[in-house]
Image (cartoon, grey):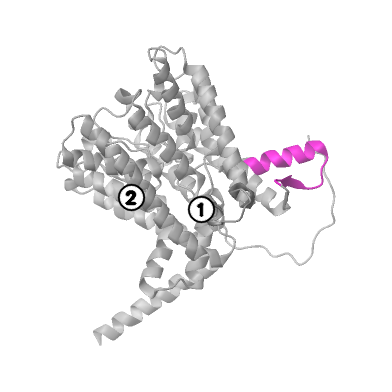
Amino acid sequence: MQPTRTSAVLETGRDWLDHVARNSPARLALMVFASIIAVFTVLLSLPAATASGERAPFVDALFTATSAVCVTGLVTVDTASYWSTFGQAVILVGIKIGGLGVMTLASILGLAVSRRIGLTQRMLAASETKTTRLGEVGSLIRAVVVASLVIEGALTVVLVPRFLALGEPVGTSLWHGLFMALSIFNNAGFVIIDGGLLPHVGDWWLGLPIVVGTAVGAIGFPVILDVARSLRDRRRRPPWTRWNLHTKLTLSTYGLLMVASVVAIGAFEWTNPNTFGPLDLDEKVLASLVQGTNPRSSGLATVDTGEMREATWFVTDALMFVGGGSASTAGGIKVTTFAVLLLAIVAEARGDRDVEAFGRRIGSSTVRLAVSVAFLGATLVGVATLALLTLTEYNLDVVLFEVISAFATVGLSTGITPHLPDAGKYVLSALMFAGRTGTMTLAAALAIRERRRVIRMPNERPVIG
């Protein structure tokens, strides 16, 4: 009787999950994500997870677990010295799961168990990866797994010899190389090197992989898949002419923002005696590249962010809020959202009826979605900023920087996060969760029902501006 009863319970649970997945995949996404964070919080609460052998305070375990699974990198304790090897391994697994995306991971598990991807799993993965055609989900998931493993493996191969050259033992070099490779590609921002990355500000062997790995991880898996397809196509046309609109918007906007951020941050910090000032020319160039890439959500800083000028903080705030590509390891409102908003403004200024880019028309529903994502993101940032200003005595500039860094899952910090009260740490934890799961996913999960209107009201235009 026991096997039958167990089978009945499992069948009931599977039916319930299938019902939730079909009717509200966004709610299921949040439930799964929250459950994974809870599991990692428990693991980091074990005495074996800390270097001292004592239990970590609950708020630090929760904050670190959330930061790892949400691939952020903000920390309340030093990752290299506070956590044991077991604790660091837990953080690394959390980074990997968060980088792949919970819904993508759920589809991988479903594929492994059933040898096929069913409609429910396809719908869930499409929600996470922003794939419009359900038939593409299987190939996209394979691309996610293969691309992540190949790129992380390549970064590991590049980084391990560098750690060996720095005099680290073989085992330590392998561990540091693997950890940093996953942290870089998944834009996680965690560092387990003693002393952090500040002593390596002029090290091109470490800095260049950070720049390249961050950029590849931040453009998004759909873009990687589309570029790979175009390269496999042997027709005579150049590969970029076969990219879809999403790829073109992502790469062009990401590239322009990256160039602008490198130039702006380099210019503002070039003579700052606390950051770029004492560096040689080649070190300044590398520091500009790394710091210009960081706002994409890398969080791997080679200079002290807390010593930067306020103008640099302001530029970084804006860049972090935009973030990287959709369905990527980056956070923010995403570069395609930013691009669509800019295109809508240009179309309105020119008096064009349609919003167009690269010979394609962007529908009004996409524009409304972009406006919603940007507004909800700004609202989350505003509410969290007010909360921290109320809970602490810090100034607006550092609080706003920390809040946007948490929302955009960047991990850059002015240094105030470890000193926040527990309530402030909980605020940032919730913000990292909301930023990683996505503002629209969060809104859909919290919505009680979808309104269906049979009758549409008469059209009338209010005065704007």
Which amino acid is tagged 1?
Ala
Q: Residue at x 40, y 26 (%)?
A: 414
Query: Is residue 282 or residue 141 the one in the foreground?
Result: 282
Residue matched to label 2? 94
Q: Which residue lies under the disc numbered 1?
A: 228
Q: Residue 430: in sight, yes or no?
A: yes
Q: Is residue 111 above or below residue 51?
A: below
Instruction: Indicate the position of residue 204 as horizontal and vertical percent values.
Output: 36, 28
Instruction: Name the residue: 56% across, 53% down.
Output: 230
In front: 98, or 2?
98
Callout 2 secondary element: helix
Question: On the rendered image, what quadrant is the N terminus found in?
Answer: bottom left
Side of 24 relative to 414 (left or right) = right
Q: Amino acid at mark 2?
A: Gly
Per the image, is 345 magenta?
A: yes
Residue 5, quarter of picture: bottom left
Magenta stretch bounds: 339-358
Residue 56 coordinates in the image, percent (x, y): 23, 42
Tell which circle, 1 or 2, labels the residue nearer the N-terminal end: 2
Q: Which mark is residue 395?
A: none
Q: What is the residue that sits farthest to the front in this orientation?
A: 236
* Measured Cα–Cα span from mark 1 to mark 2: 28 Å
Q: Nearer the viewer, mark 1 or mark 2?
A: 1
Q: Position of residue 59 (x, y in %)?
A: 31, 42
Q: Secondary structure at mark 1?
A: helix
| Residue 431 magenta | no
Does 41 sit above or below residue 75? below
Decide whether the magenta segment is chiefly helix, strand or loop: helix
Left or right, 384 with reference to 429: right
Position of residue 341 relative to residue 289, above or below, is: below
